[in-house]
Amino acid sequence: MSQISRIVGIVLVRNEDLYVERAVRNIAAFCHTLLLCDDRSVDHTADILRSLAEEIPHASFHPLTHPSQSHDLLKPFVGTPTWVFGVDGDEIYDPSGLKAFRQRLLSGEFDALWRMKGNVLHCLEWEAGRARGHAAPPSRSITKLYNFAAIASWDGDTVERLHGGTIRFQPGFHDAMKRNLQDELDWDASPLRCLHLCFLPRSSRESAASSVRENIMEIHRGGLRGKIRRLANRLLGRGTPSRWKREHYGRGPLLNVETGPFFP
């Protein structure tokens, strides 16, 4: 019998009003608890999250002043029978796949693991029910699904939820206890698959020609050189493109997939 009794979803977003509603709705039935966190958005993202929190009984809205506060929300679940599922506003999961995967997760099939990753398509183009992009593998998977029963603490310099800091494991667990479904299953067979819209505009305040955004880790750990580069770009009225995403997500051959299952 599984010891896991709960799946907690945590959505951390900033200026993601184009797709965040679909991102949340597609994972809502998968989660027992849904934490919707807005990191100082200046578009309509916060309003969308507030509305969803009012509509979805197991969802709550959390306005943040720093992304590290999102990790603080997870600390009560450390050492408890909980899987934590981290999702961004540009991550659209397959809800039918999650429905089947939820049963497997709660049955105890994966209780001995610390972390799981799934199949991802990092989308470059999007039109007429199809998407084209780089698949994981060989590019990097972004799925964040953690077994919090495996850890005794997760403290330290956590720039955002499920990133950074120091993890102390429960007896019998260690960091290498992972399973990468993207290495076992192809895109069509995977129950844990995601359209990652990281190369597309995600806010109504962005133009179609906007540069690929830096992620939170790049912004907060870019050092003095990164701060100067961002300031110069801001003064010139342009964004700072993400080098990290190009290197890790823009890799491998291009794959074309149908997007219908992701937009029921």
Image (cartoon, helix red, strand yellow):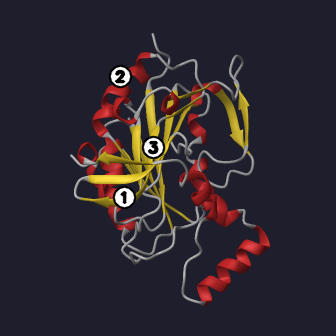
Label 2 close to label 1 by CB (< 8 Å): no
Q: Quadrant of the N terminus?
A: top left
User: Viewer-proximal residue, 215 or 256?
Assistant: 256
Alpha carbon distance from label 3 to label 1: 17 Å
Pick out the residue farthest to the bottom.
Answer: 236
Q: Is residue 83 visible?
A: yes
Q: Is residue 221 above or below residue 119?
A: below
Q: Secondary structure at mark 3?
A: strand
Amino acid bearing label 3: Val
Label 1 belongs to which residue? 20
Of marks 2 and 1, which one's residue comes earlier in the chain? 1
What residue is rendered at 32% in x and 26% in y?
100
* Callout 3 crowding tier (Cα within 10 Å): few <14, some 14–19, many ≥20: many
Q: Residue 120 — which label?
A: 3
**Taking 241 as reference, is 167 left or right?**
right
Q: Residue 103 — which label?
A: 2
User: Viewer-proximal residue, 156 or 14?
Assistant: 14
Q: Is residue 99 above or below residue 54?
A: above
Alpha carbon distance from label 3 to label 2: 21 Å
Amino acid bearing label 1: Val
